[in-house]
Image (spheres, grey):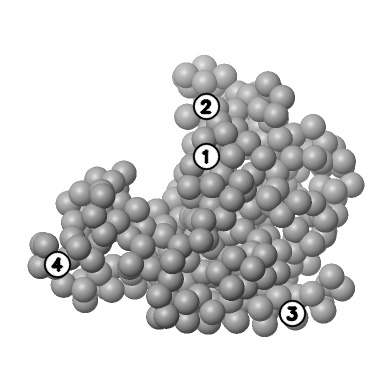
């Protein structure tokens, strides 16, 4: 990538602006362009961020822009679309958001964009697939946030329960970013020990661990019930993903990636651990799954496959 690190954000709602604000605090990029269907809102958000720059330790050029700004940007982050309402599943958002995403992808493509696209809009696995098919670019350059936040939630709750730093917990939520996601306990580690070894050694209750997973699965619904939306966690997750790309960190992050026979499935986007580098997804890490875990993965795939089939027919993909 060139020296100037440029990011375009499409959609200046709470998720997008939480990401933007976090980047203002951490730095790591040089230019941030804000886009929204409501152009005045994008201009207002840019003004608000710029007014805080004198107190920020990181100099970032922030402005409102258009799709032409995508042409020379390194990363485009898509947070646009209808929001998840109380009691509504992510998958219920599919029909309206797939049409929105197709339109956005066509406009990005028309700009001559050559960088990496990150999709954060829900249902993220399906919408990532839509962007990939519409754009016609390498699968490594379209990344969905997938189970990135779900994985962070699991690491946080396990760290609280085990009284161990979240930095020393390796845990991955796999599958759909939604109700069919699951955790592979056999691939969860506390430091250099497997979680199962840790459970036996500390005489912990597996029921507690399963309750923690259910808390992770239901977290978005509970937050939405209390405050109408979730945005800080995903904003920071986007920050982590963006900086991992720019820094060519080779960090393993659980994102929504295009499967091409990995985990026994293909032609679908699902949450799996991936090595993230300068050109996007460098490699999908295939975890060893036992029969129970593979069955859960298969069930999650089947849910997404049926929705994908309808989406392809609806959009003529």
First in sequence: mark 4 or mark 2?
2
Write the residue at 49% across / 42% down: 251
Mark 2 vs mark 3: in front: 3
First in sequence: mark 1 or mark 3?
1
3D distance between C-alphas at marks 4 and 3: 44 Å
Mark 4 vs mark 3: in front: 4
Write the residue at 54% across / 47% down: 275
Give the percent coordinates (x, y) of residue 82: 65, 64
Q: Is residue 107 left or right of residue 215?
A: right
Q: Is residue 189 left or right of residue 98?
A: left
First in sequence: mark 2 or mark 3?
2
Looking at the rendered structure, the secondary structure element under dot 3 is helix
Mark 3, other Cα within 10 Å: few <14 / some 14–19 / many ≥20: few
**Residue under pointer 4:** 200
Front-most of residues 245 and 55: 245
**Residue under pointer 3:** 309
3D distance between C-alphas at marks 2 and 1: 19 Å
Write the residue at 70% across / 29% down: 1
Q: How many marks?
A: 4
Front-most of residues 31 and 287: 287
Looking at the rendered structure, the secondary structure element under dot 2 is loop
Q: Is residue 74 left or right of residue 71?
A: left
Give the percent coordinates (x, y) of residue 137: 79, 51
First in sequence: mark 4 or mark 3?
4
**Residue under pointer 2:** 27
- Whether residue 23 is situated above or below residue 90 in the rendered picture: above
- Whether residue 198 is situated above or below residue 265 in the rendered picture: above
Mark 2 vs mark 1: in front: 1
3D distance between C-alphas at marks 4 and 2: 43 Å
Q: Which mark is drawn over residue 250?
A: 1
């Amino acid at each position: 990538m060139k020296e100037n690190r440029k990011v375009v954000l499409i959609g200046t709602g709470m998720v997008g602006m939480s990401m933007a604000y976090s980047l203002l605090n951490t730095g790591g990029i040089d230019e941030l362009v804000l886009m929204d269907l409501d152009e005045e809102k994008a201009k207002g958000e840019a003004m608000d961020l710029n007014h805080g720059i004198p107190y920020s330790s990181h100099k970032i050029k922030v402005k409102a822009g258009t799709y032409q700004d995508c042409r020379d940007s390194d990363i485009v982050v898509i947070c646009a679309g209808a929001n998840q309402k109380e009691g509504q599943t992510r998958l219920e958002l599919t029909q309206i958001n797939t049409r929105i995403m197709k339109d956005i992808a066509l406009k990005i493509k028309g700009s001559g964009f050559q960088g990496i696209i990150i999709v954060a809009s829900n249902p993220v696995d399906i919408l990532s697939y839509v962007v990939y098919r519409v754009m016609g670019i390498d699968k490594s350059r379209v990344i969905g946030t997938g189970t990135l936040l779900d994985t962070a939630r699991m690491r946080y709750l396990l760290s609280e329960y085990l009284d161990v730093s979240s930095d020393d917990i390796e845990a991955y939520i796999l599958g759909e970013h939604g109700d069919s996601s699951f955790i592979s306990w056999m691939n969860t580690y506390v430091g250099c020990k497997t979680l199962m070894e840790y459970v036996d050694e500390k005489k912990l209750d597996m029921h507690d661990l399963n309750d923690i997973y259910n808390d992770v699965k239901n977290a978005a619904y509970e937050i939405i019930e209390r405050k109408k939306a979730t945005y800080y966690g995903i904003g920071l997750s986007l920050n982590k993903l963006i900086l991992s790309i720019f820094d060519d960190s080779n960090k393993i992050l659980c994102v929504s990636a295009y499967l091409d026979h990995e985990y026994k499935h293909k032609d679908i986007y699902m949450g799996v651990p991936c090595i993230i580098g300068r050109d996007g997804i460098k490699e999908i890490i295939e975890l060893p799954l036992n029969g129970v875990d593979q069955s859960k993965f298969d069930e999650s795939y089947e849910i997404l496959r049926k929705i994908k089939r309808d989406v392809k027919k609806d959009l003529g993909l």
